[in-house]
Amino acid sequence: MELSKNFQHTEAEIKWYNHWNSAGYFTSTPDDRPPYTIVMPPPNVTGVLHMGHALNNSVQDILIRRAKMMGFNTCWVPGTDHASIATEAKVVNMLRDMGIDKKKMPRDEFLKYAWEWKEKYGGIILKQLEKLGCSLDWSRTTFTMDEDYYAAVIRVFVELYEKGLIYRGVKMINWDPKAKTALSDEEVNHKQTNSKLYYVRYKLDIEGDEYITIATVRPETILGDTAVCVHPEDERYAHLKGKYCFVPLINRRIPIIFDEYIDKEFGTGALKVTPAHDINDYNLGLKHNLQVIDTLNEDGTMSDAAQLYVGLDRFVVRKQIAEDLRIAGNLVKEEEYSNQVGFSERTDVVIEPRLSMQWWCNMQDLSQPALEAVMNDDISFHPAKFKNTYRHWMANIKDWCISRQLWWGQRIPAWYDADGTLYVANNEAEATEKYKAAKPELAAAKPDLRQDDDVLDTWFSSWLWPMEVFGWNKQPDNRDLQYYYPTSTLVTAPEIIFFWVARMAMAGYEFLGQKPFEKVYYTGIVRDKQGRKMSKSLGNSPDLLELIEKNGADAVRFSVMISSPAGNDLLFDESQLEQGSFFCNKLWNAMKLVKGWETRCADDVTTTDVNFAMQWIDARLGQVSAEVEELMKEFRLSEALKTIYSLIWNDFCSWYLEWVKPGMEQPIATAVYQHTVTVYERLLQLLHPFLPFITEEIYHLLRTRATGDDLMVLQMPAYSTPDVTLLMGGTQLQELITAIRDTRNKNRLKPKDTIKLWIQTSEEAYYTQVLAILSRQVNAEQTNFTGEAIPGAISIVVGTDKLYIEAAAATIDTEAQKAEMVKEIAYLQGFLISVDKKLGNERFMANAKPDVIESEQKKKNDALAKIKTLEESLANLG
RNA sequence: GGGAGCAUAGCUCAGCUGGUUCAGAGCAUCUGCCUUACAAGCAGAGGGUCCGCGGUUCGAACCCGUGUGCUCCCA
């Protein structure tokens, strides 16, 4: 077969993905094997694949593929989140582009458009995950607004309402004036913003022309002021007890109140109080029984209650009122000021705190078992540092604002009758029943019930994800749920620890009495080379599909995995992508080399020369596979990949293949060829979870495979404990080769120049084993043992053995050799002193562990022997 | 204001339980090689005040304190 010069990733990716899929490797049904389950964090239907997804899903795919090889029945569930606010915004925009105004449209019609939009664009992101190689069980694909899922969300609402955990109430909420909806605290991002601090004086209602000056960054809220507050111990204002002042421009008479909440140092020490538009002011208002004047409309313009600027946008008014205050003589000064301002996570507009009637979920009781589970590691966090973050939030948890003034989402299952009485039920029929039961006198008449217009927060549906993807609502004891739940590992970003992780834990315990997952792996944030978070708005996120097309999915997976330990940010750099491509190339070339031997196999060639190499690589394979197992257990994926990378590139390609490589046009022993192919297969298997495509491709090129013999489902063998002597022998051989090559380089020998090698050692048996390999690797035409120094030869010391190199082409610099030996002896003597110091220290001998003492003793002996050898060699040089 | 974390080679970072198999990897740099798998490669080499200071310890990159600089999360 003709092999291409390089790995053709595009074709291979399509071929193998389809093959795995049609072979049924992605789908899972319960059986006798232990399950290994991951539910994918459902991306927003509005999303497109970006680097964050690449990292997150690569991690999940690696865990799934490895678990499959380890004998687990793996199930990885895909799906999407309806993302109420984000999707609604997209649909509104789409309609606007079509010249349609959402406001002029009935709810049903809007939802029809929204579903159309979802059908058209909602699956794109999942399709894109195929390109990355994700081994997802597509038959289980779930959407958070699927009929069953929708019903589950409604059921949960009703249950919590009946338990008294969900209630309706007027509170200060975060208002998004663009999306015109309430947001939860978690949906608000605080950003440092440059503002202006305005100092405004309010005329006092006393004799004379006296004022009190306040400082504010939001002068437009002055129109809603209902008090001015100062600290009770502030002497500057002590004389104002019981006095009043006037709000500028509108001359509302408001009291001056005293409260310890005030920071005397800030501004002038006097605070204007606007209970309708600031959470702290609101609390002050409650305490001091202040009037609440809401001066804003839902779109962020001034309301009638403001009296002035009615209908103008809040930011326009901010400028205008400053000017008007100046003209009126109330503006004392302005200064530059930097403060934290809340922005909507979805629309990125400035949030207005606003009093509003919303639905709330009491989190106090729900949070308890979820908090305990994480603190006692029943649910373990990786890395564990996020336990603190989690505890901090859970211990201070507030009620969750779950209603949104949107249409796209699960509509709140609450109905109001003509009197405004509330009926919470799973559907209208049930609500009607409740209504009739409550008001039997009206039962005969046609009930006039109106459903609440609001929908639920998206996260109020996604917190059910791990249970509802397995059909909890329809049949809580169904086989899938019994088998796959609790899921094994959740892989997600620390950003959504509160939004999602914590709430899933709460839902799991509340509705199933069980945790939703055993372990949580937090990925880092993907940043660009300058350390900035990759984001659409910055435009610094590379197009993932383009990267895959250009470099191959394997190279992309390699690049995101090689430098991202759990919880650490990933600085994405093109050079890692290169490293990934180069690695694929290396794998491909190694395959070409090995395949090239296939036709040169002969049964009558001795394996004696290379037995050592074969035994050694077996030992290394066993050793590394145990290391990888440990690393994977601890979720140290990047370490595991590095370890495998190094095993393949260094041990296998640079050492092993060179050691067993037959001479030009020479035959190779069939046994050696077979062994090499087998070792290569095992290496591919270790690597497969990380780089699935190229490994599967090479696996199939190495041998002709029966149907079903695919790397993806090849079960991991049990490796025996590696032979330590062999491993050390291999290291020693590498040291010998490197030392001789170094000497060759230093003596300006060309690769083609041959040498004669003499070895002076007490371990001839070892050398005999590796002699053939050693000779070939250093291009020695002749290798012999010797009992004494070879005059005129280059002399080097490796370990405690002396090597003599004779080369016609060499220009021997005895002085340089001597200088090097002197340097080495000096170093060893220094080292010896430090070891001796330890061994001579009574407290060390008394306190250190026996094996530490033993190893120090050995170091001492080794150093002594080496010094002796070096000194002898030095003497021989004269 | 509260919390979490980081500082190690020119760059990006590993280094888990304190001990010379511990000061390491990749990239970058230098030297030599078109060697019949791979120049996207091979063979070598150089490069460090493990942020400063103090402490604990027989022993500290690692533990404790402190200073400096930076990042993130929450309010």
Image: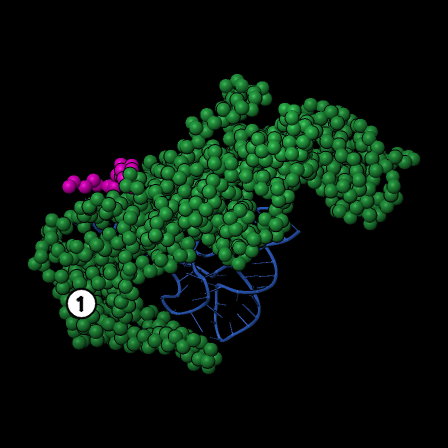
The image position of residue A168, as x and y in percent, is: 66, 37
- Between A75 and A740, the one nearer to me in the picture: A75
User: As drawn, is A37 to the left or to the right of A874?
Assistant: right
Give the drawing colour for chain B.
blue
User: Residue visible at 27% across and 50% down?
Assistant: A714
Does residue A11 show up magenta in the picture?
Answer: yes
Query: Could one spot residue A223 in this view of the protein?
Result: yes
User: As drawn, is A759 to the left or to the right of A50?
Assistant: left
State the residue position of label 1.
A769
The image position of residue A470, as x and y in percent, is: 44, 43
Give the drawing colour for chain A.
green
Q: Quadrant of the N terminus of chain A?
A: top left
The image position of residue A233, as x and y in percent, is: 82, 49
Does residue A756 show up magenta in the picture?
Answer: no
User: Residue visible at 52% across and 17% down?
Assistant: A99
Q: Residue furthest top?
A: A99
Which residues make up the magenta segment? A1-20
User: Residue visible at 54% across and 43% down?
Assistant: A499
